[in-house]
Image: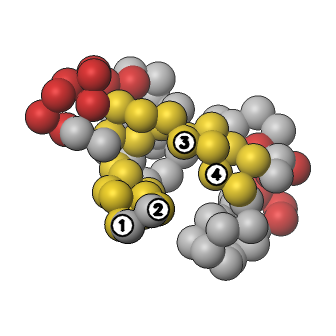
Amino acid sequence: MTEPHCGSDLQAIKTTAVRDGDDYIINGSKIYISGGINADLALVAAKTDPSAGSKGISVFLVESTRDGYVRGGTSTRWA
């Protein structure tokens, strides 16, 4: 849930998720993910309704094989 500009202040996240048919398009970045470089799945917090404040945040289970998923560190992989 931690982002570069807001630390662990969940209400200040800038990552967004917008519905696109049956899917969501998630746009944002996270930092300090323990074991993230080796994970096949990630729980990603994103704003789905910015006007709803803290009630407009959702958590998504994202597979690391999805298009656009990028890992940092020594095993950076671009999808």
Give the amino acid type for the residue marked by disc 3 in the picture: Phe
Residue 62 shows which numbered tag?
Answer: 4
User: Image height check: is 35 above or below 28?
Assistant: above
Residue depth check, mark 3 versus mark 2: number of the one nearer the observer: 2
On the image, which quarter does residue 5 sit in? top left
Residue beneath label 3, please? 60
Q: Earlier in the sequence, mark 3 or mark 2?
A: 2
Give the amino acid type for the residue marked by disc 4 in the picture: Val
Query: How far is mark 1 from mark 3, CA to CA?
Result: 14 Å
Query: How far is mark 1 from mark 4, CA to CA?
Result: 15 Å
Q: Nearer the viewer, residue 15 or 73?
A: 15
Residue 20 shows which numbered tag?
Answer: 1
Q: Earlier in the sequence, mark 2 or mark 4?
A: 2
Q: Are marks 3 and 4 in contact (CB under 8 Å)?
A: yes
Residue beneath label 2, please? 23
Give the amino acid type for the residue marked by disc 1 in the picture: Asp
Mark 1 Cα shell of 10 Å, populated few (<14), some (14-19), many (≥20): few
- Taking the image as drawn, is residue 17 in sight? yes
On the image, which quarter does residue 48 sit in? top left
Please, what secondary structure does the residue beneath circle 1 have? strand
